[in-house]
Amino acid sequence: VQLQASGGGLVQAGVSLTLSCAASGRTFSNHAMAWFRQAPGKGREFVASISVNKNTYYADSVKGRFTISRDNAKNTVYLHMNSLKPEDTAVYYCAAKFPFRSSWYSYYEDEYTYWGQGTQVTVSS
């Protein structure tokens, strides 16, 4: 699976932004998808994931503000980000894994097989 993330940018705190991750190469609908992010000087952290059967999971830091969704017809996963904060500033990466069950998800980056190149989100105060 090849992943192409897009939609990042420089925004002010409080606004909304939607990231997209377009997949190609294999059957997208059979893959669990996730978003991770890496802030300057920090390690990569889990943001959200969506399983094959469309269950969603969120990091506590984004729960209630971010929404992950997928459109299997468009081979795309989205991250809708509301009420952005300066601490959301990071490079956002999408990731994919062909799982052994449709409900599979993971918070751990090592368990994902495919990665996109990242898109920068900068939130100014």
Image: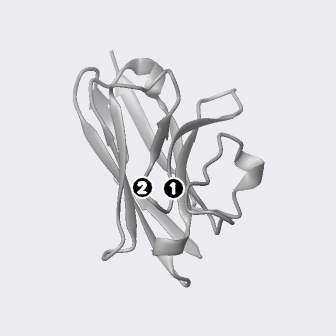
For disc 1, the marked residue is: 51
The residue shown at (57%, 61%) is 116
Image-based side of 80 in relation to 35, left or right: left
The residue shown at (74%, 53%) is 111
> In the displayed structure, would residue 28 be above or below residue 56?
below
The image position of residue 70, as x and y in percent, is 36, 60
> In the displayed structure, would residue 106 be above or below residue 59?
below
Residue lying furthest right in this view?
A: 110
The residue shown at (55%, 68%) is 31
Q: Secondary structure at mark 2?
A: loop
Are the residues tagged 2 and 1 within 8 Å (C-beta)?
Answer: yes
Image-based side of 8 in relation to 59, left or right: left
The image position of residue 56, as x and y in percent, is 45, 44
Locate the N terminus by quadrant: bottom right
The tag on residue 37 is: none
Q: Splitting the image into 4 quarters, where does residue 103 fall?
A: bottom right
Binning the other alpha carbons within 10 Å of mark 1 as few (below 14), some (14 to 19) or many (20 upward) gives many
Locate the C terminus by quadrant: top left
Q: Amino acid at mark 2?
A: Lys
Q: Amino acid at mark 1?
A: Ser
For disc 2, the marked residue is: 54
> In the displayed structure, would residue 80 be above or below residue 114?
above
